[in-house]
Amino acid sequence: MPDLLSDKTAVITGASSGNGRAIARIFAENGADVVVADIQKEPRLGGTPTHELITEQTSSRAAYVKCDVTSNQDLRAAINQADEYGGIDVMVNNAGVFAHNEDLFNVTEEDYRTMMDVNSKGAYFGSQFAAEKMQQTGGGNIINLSSINGDIGTKSNVAYCASKGAVKVMTYALADALGPDIRVNAIHPGMIETAQIVKDYDHLEEEQREERLDTIPLERQGHPEEIGKAALFLASDLASYVNATSLAVDGGVANTR
């Protein structure tokens, strides 16, 4: 099979680490040039910076742009960087924050605002600015990272659920607003082995860890590469008639919980 993203350019927020890093690598392996847009250059779990890894291990081009997704100026700069590679074709709004076992009554207005600004506002304006560019060049597609917590509510993550639920419905509205030339879809990851989840998981006792795994029909955590493959599908022509859809990559949790 030929490279699925040949001659495409992708901007991926939060791509220095975790799911974003895996998405960036898999896109590059399939022919895409990549703009790594992240608040920090170094991966949270260590290793070679994503853009350097791509240029060392693939034939694709890559650049790092410092990007805080709560800053519209930073988002525009990241998207404009894609012009160096011919212009943006794929926007992946991946950057996000997660509160570990938040207490509903201890969440402050500032906490809530930060959660919404990063997870929801960042995806909104990342989509808006990317779509402006895509409309000038004939189209493209947008992938938003929501969560299974955008589908189901949990008492320990009320603000997070609110922010990711917003991303889910926003995705459908964007697809309606931007069709037919721009497809917009969402990925809903479950328990994936990213720095955020590892930090949370390491605090649990062995029995609690087993209980968490017991809620997953596949009885294991997912890997960032599995999110990357889902994103590759949505970004490619294999998904040419997939639009306004939420793709759960959660081992079966959301529909069996």
Image (cartoon, rainbow, N blue to C red):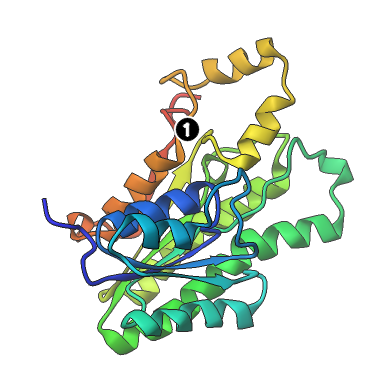
- Residue 148 in the image, given as x and y percentages of width and height: 52, 40
The part of the image, by quadrant, that contains residue 85 is bottom left
Q: Note whether residue 248 is visible.
A: no
Identify the residue at image location x=59%, y=13%: 210
Q: In this view, does 176 lie above or below 189?
A: below
Q: In this rendering, would 111 be left or right of 170?
A: right
Q: Which of the pair 45/222 is nearer the observer? A: 45
Given the image, on which type of amino acid does mark 1 rest?
Ala
- Residue 48 in the image, given as x and y percentages of width and height: 52, 52
Q: In this rendering, would 152 be left or right of 11?
A: right
Q: Which of the pair 209/80 is nearer the observer? A: 80
Q: In this view, does 91 lie above or below 227?
A: below
Q: Mark 1 points at which residue?
A: 254
User: How many numbered dots are placed on residues in this image?
Assistant: 1
Q: Which of the pair 214/31 is nearer the observer? A: 31
Q: In this rendering, would 219 be left or right of 104?
A: left
Q: Residue furthest bottom?
A: 136
Identify the residue at image location x=51%, y=51%: 146
Q: In this rendering, would 88 be left or right of 44?
A: left
- Residue 213 in the image, given as x and y percentages of width and height: 54, 19
- Residue 22 in the image, given as x and y percentages of width and height: 43, 48
Identify the residue at image location x=46%, y=61%: 52
Identify the residue at image location x=38%, y=84%: 84
Q: Is mark 1 on a helix, strand or loop?
A: loop
